[in-house]
Amino acid sequence: MEKNGSLEDENRRIRYLKMIVNLGLALLRQERLSRREAEQIVESIRRSALRMFPGKESTWEIVYAPRFRRAIEERWGKSTARES
């Protein structure tokens, strides 16, 4: 039974992560935000994801970071060194 409970917990965390990622992407695309505010939202979602899935930084960088980067670049353009 423990294994089933563990799988259910992981599935719940995956569903929650998908929800906050989709919500974050919608916020970036639809709300009146500065680029800095958008980047803070992304960082907050990243921290939440890594709390739910410790040690999965590489998965974040491969799966989610590019989606958020594209959303930010579509709206605010590519970042310059001066902005960083």
Image (cartoon, helix red, strand yellow):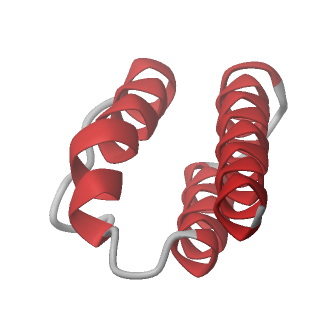
Extreme-front residue of the structure: 1
Compared with residue 77, is residue 57 higher up or lower down, i.e. above or below? below
In the foreground, 14 or 36: 14
Q: Position of residue 67 (x, y in %)?
A: 39, 30
Extreme-left residue of the structure: 81
How many callouts does the rendering have?
0
Q: Which residue occupies 21% across, 44% down?
A: 62
In the foreground, 56 or 1: 1
Q: Which residue occupies 55% across, 68% down?
A: 43
Quadrant placement of the N terminus = bottom right
Compared with residue 37, is residue 55 higher up or lower down, i.e. above or below? below
Q: Which residue occupies 47% across, 26% down?
A: 71
- Quarter of image, res 44: bottom right
Quadrant placement of the C terminus = bottom left
Q: Position of residue 69 (x, y in %)?
A: 35, 38
Residue 51 appears left or right of 32? left
Compared with residue 13, is residue 75 higher up or lower down, i.e. above or below? above
Q: Position of residue 59 (x, y in %)?
A: 28, 54
Q: Which residue occupies 68% across, 63% down?
A: 6
In the foreground, 22 or 71: 22
Q: Position of residue 56 (x, y in %)?
A: 34, 68
Residue 31 appears left or right of 50? right
In the foreground, 71 or 15: 15
- Quarter of image, res 47: bottom right
